[in-house]
Amino acid sequence: MTESTSQHTPFEPRLVAFLCHYCAFAAADMAGSMRLQYPPNVRNIRLPCTGKLDAGHILRAFEEGADGVMIAGCEEGSCHFLKGNLVAKSRVNWVKTLLAKVGLEPERLHMYNLSSAMGPRWAAIVQEHVERVRALGPSPARAPRPAKSEATK
Amino acid sequence: MIVGEQKPFEQIVKLIERYRRVLVAGCGTCVSVCFAGGEKEAGILASMLRLEAQKNGRPLEVLEQTVKRQCDMEFLEEMTTKVGQVDAVLSIACGCGIQFMAERFQDKIILPGLNTKFIGVTLEQGEWAERCAMCGDCILDRTGGVCPVARCAKRLHNGPCGGSSGGKCEVGKDRDCGWALIVQRLQKLGELERYAEIIPPRNWTTSRDGGQRKVVREDLKEQGRIEPR
Amino acid sequence: MTEAAAAKKAPKPAAEKTPPPPVVGPVSGLEKLIQSGGFAVTAELGPPKGLDLEAIHKKVGILKGWVDAANVTDNQTAVVRVSSIATAAIMVQQGLEPVMQMVARDRNRIAIQSDMLGATALGIRNVLCLSGDHQTFGSEPGAANVYDVDSIQMLGILKGMRDDAKFAGGTDVEGGRPPLFLGAAWSPDADPAEVRTLRLAKKVRAGAQFVQTQCIFDLAQFKLEMKKAGDMGLLDKLAVLPGIIPLKSAGMAKFMRKNVAGISIPEDVVKRMEGNKDGKEEGTKIAVETIQAVREIPGVRGVHIMAIEWESKVADIVSRAGLKKGPGA
């Protein structure tokens, strides 16, 4: 039985987060050292800047089974590379249209902006996106489970 | 460069729906520069096709490969292995690359994933515009370096027509009137008297009208055939 | 050896082939009137969008006698209609002289020349060479356009057939040359301003004997362009027939000013239209006054009245302008 069809265990979304080294990654670090509680559903990937983010990376995450993806970059106007986060914003909006084309809800992808000092905000936005994706349910494009073959083993 | 634009995604899905294994074949030259059919675009398209198939529960395996140019046989050779592993190839090269694929891989279904638009230039990131219509007998010396064949909607050689206003074409206000540009430039060059010359009817045999075109350089062909002794 | 083969081997000397006799004008009533110094009036007759021949007969009836010739539009605004050749031929039969329009949009030089021979065979003499409205505006937006030649090149080709008995490709016109009175369009208010008269000069050099203009409301501007044309020596060989459009309302004036290329409508004309409750009457008055004013400009040899889907107005304008046309004139 897969998570999605289970009546008993609540659906736990799997999230991939792309974090800017200069802000969100540091904020996540701070959240850790502050011992803030936030959902363990997210896998963090550090980027030198959200401007490095590629449309292919996001799509790949969904292909590999992510239910949602979040991008976290610096606050607008504070990019270490001046406009990387603004480029990322535009790119994320474009990828949302691609998701719609393949039949995925664009809301599964979300971009946040925060500074390195915002440990609590990091915890809050993870919580927020987890809830958003939980409400949407499992990604309909999750790679088919090897569940059957496992069951027969 | 040759400017292309990917076909709408839902059209591409329809094109490949009969096949279970597909190779998305990118081209690393012109269509790569205009972000339509290069390595990145091949990757994104392949991902989208997999996601769409997974979502709809259709079995589909998508491979990807991009070569330097699909309009040269030596680069197509590199694709032989992957082409052998699929039912069909979705090429996102220009029409030349797609056809050369079909010529190289005679027994393989080759599908077009891209519409070849025109020969053009990059106006700014994300905007390309046509400049040459490949008429085969350049007359830019007579028209101030602005081509009336490519840039007049009626390819008038003694324009402008009466439809141009405020320097814009009657077909769309987002397009400059080619003849307004010609006049402007001739004036800037102090060559407006060239405008008075009537350009006579063209000989279109150098264009598409003369039938399929070919360029032959015998010296190069000869050098290409030389074998080491 | 058969006779034919023998003929092939020993071609007849070229001298035996006599070129067709030259065309000596005037070839049409319109050309004759202009040559004799008369003031020509032309109007427009749009063919129907189907085989409603009665519509053609009706328009002929309305215009006959009041105009010296009427233009037959060639799939105007790129909307499919009865061909200008067929409509013009019907007009010839019914005694209203046609000015057959021919656009470069729909024909290559083979069709242009062949159609022109056919048209002259049917008694058509006046032809107006145009580029044509772009097909994307019309009823067949997906059509390919031809534009093998443009209007100026078309004039040159037709002139060559008539004056040199040569087709565009260099072969001979055999038997008889097409007797043609060649016309073109001129937009004295069009962009870019630098080439308004330069382009007219090209048309004259290519073979235009008369031009009908885009409609004139800005008299000062028109006079200026006519002066330039005169200074360039164009008006000795060319009859200019300024276009007259009777306005129906201030709204129409504003719409045309905003949306139709090459038309300049001064503010005082719009004000006059706004000032009169009876827009049609005011529009007619303006048309009549414009005709009287352009008559005084050197080089103007007539007027071209474009009463769009209002052909019935032409007679009224002509008589009120004192042009001495009409049955019995």
Image (cartoon, coloured by chain):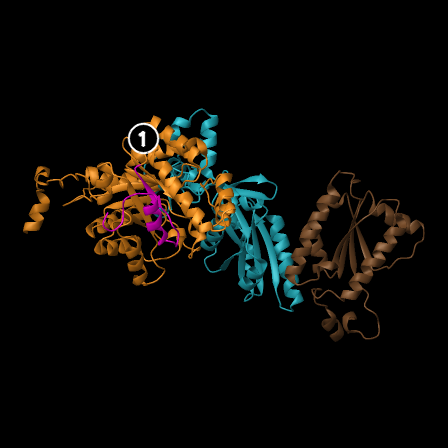
Residue A62 on the magenta span: no
> Residue A2 lies in what quarter of the image?
bottom right
Residue C320 on the magenta span: yes
Residue B145: x and y in percent read 45, 32
- Residue depicted at x 60% and y 52%: B42
Total numbered badges shown on the rendered structure: 1
Q: Colour of chain B?
A: cyan
Q: Is residue C4 above or below residue B108?
A: above
Question: What is the secondary structure assignment of the residue under circle 1?
Answer: loop
Q: Residue furthest right?
A: A34
> Residue C296 lies in what quarter of the image?
top left
**Region in magenta:** C301-329
Chain colored orange: C
Q: Nearer the viewer, residue C213 or B170?
A: C213
- Residue depicted at x 64% and y 63%: B52
Left or right? Give the position of A104 relative to C308: right
Judging from the image, mark 1 belongs to the subunit labelled C
Residue B148: x and y in percent read 42, 38
Mark 1 residue crowding within 10 angstroms, few (<14) / some (14–19) / many (20+): many
Q: Nearer the viewer, residue C43 or A9?
A: C43
**Residue highlighted by disc 1:** C234
